[in-house]
Image: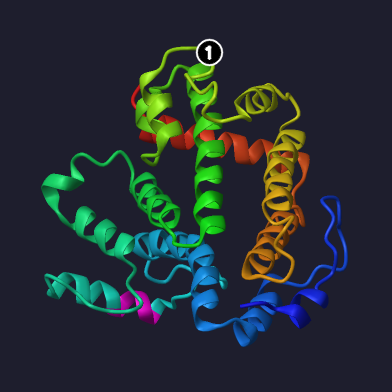
Amino acid sequence: MNYYCLIAGLPDLQPDQGKGLPSMETLLEELQETLSPDDAALLRLLQMQYDNHNLLAYLADKDAPLHPLGTLTATDWAELMVLVDETDNPQDARLQPYMLTFLQTINDEKKRENIYSQENLLTTLYYDFGSNSENKFVAEWFNYCLNINNILTALICRKHGFDIKQAIIGNNTVAQAIRTSNTRDFGLAGIFDETDTLMAIADEPNLLEREKKIDLLKWNWLEDKTFFHYFSIERVLAFWLKCELLHRWDNLTAENGQQIFRQLLNELKKDVKL
């Protein structure tokens, strides 16, 4: 389905844009009113990153505030928890297959012993789920983001002496190469073109600039992949993803950049054996 009026009315976003952005909540409301059911499902797939955040928050504290961009409420989570606990094969449209696998795994004492962290497990299942989307653009976006995250994580692990194999998530070609290679570029020559660029970014001493360069890579990828998609759902989803990137910088400062990096290191120390 094409969205001529919708796309024609969207502002032309720039990577350094700081003003004139719609809020994500406002944008979501507009898109939900416009997209076809099939295309709205693709947007919900992207939104599920917020559901993952909310699920982990709910498991830690049932009264924890939930991210407003998640598709499920605290009531939804409470009902789904009961359903999973009381039913061997629960059927509920709200419960995505990867979420069910996650909940069944952490509820199984034997399987739970082999989990390095709940967050890694949930993220792995989510990326595997998204990478198998029937929409090529969405599937490739999941793979691209997974590759960037894994390469940067592997470089940090190498620098600080953490076990790389435990920190890598997902099961695609890049993830498997990183887990099995001891070469400087993790054996990714000819597999992932931007490996050298990411290695240079990882050496950036200014952590705020580092985050910006990572987001610029993603921005340019979105530009390239939608160049010939003029009025399609791919163009709409790219706009959503670009707005996410821009809003991430609303309150981000050099101090926040340091905090992001410290948080990543602390998570690696906690979840990965030395």
Inspect the magenta stretch and tell me whether residue 42 lies in it. Answer: no
Residue 202 spot, x, y in % from top left = 65, 26
Q: Is residue 200 above or below residue 101?
A: above
Considering depth in this image, is 257 or 149 the residue closer to the camera? 149
**What's the residue type where badge 1 is placed?**
Arg
Relative to 85, 146 lies left or right: right
Per the image, label 1 sits on a secondary structure element best described as: loop
Residue extending farthest to the bottom is: 33
Q: What predominant SS class does the magenta segment belong to?
A: helix
**Residue 66 can be seen in this image:** no
Q: Residue at x 50, y 45 (%)?
A: 143
Dot 1: few (<14), some (14–19), or many (≥20) neighbours within 10 Å? few
Position of 97 relative to 260 (above/below): below
Direction from residue 10 to residue 91 in the image, left or right:
left
When asked about the image quadrant of residue 67, the answer is bottom right
Q: Which residue carries the number 1 mark?
A: 184
Q: Where the N terminus falls, by quadrant?
A: bottom right
Instruction: Look at 68% across and 21% down and name the residue there.
Output: 203
Magenta stretch? Answer: 75-79
Q: Position of residue 241 (x, y in %)?
A: 66, 59
In the picture, which quadrant includes the C terminus? top left
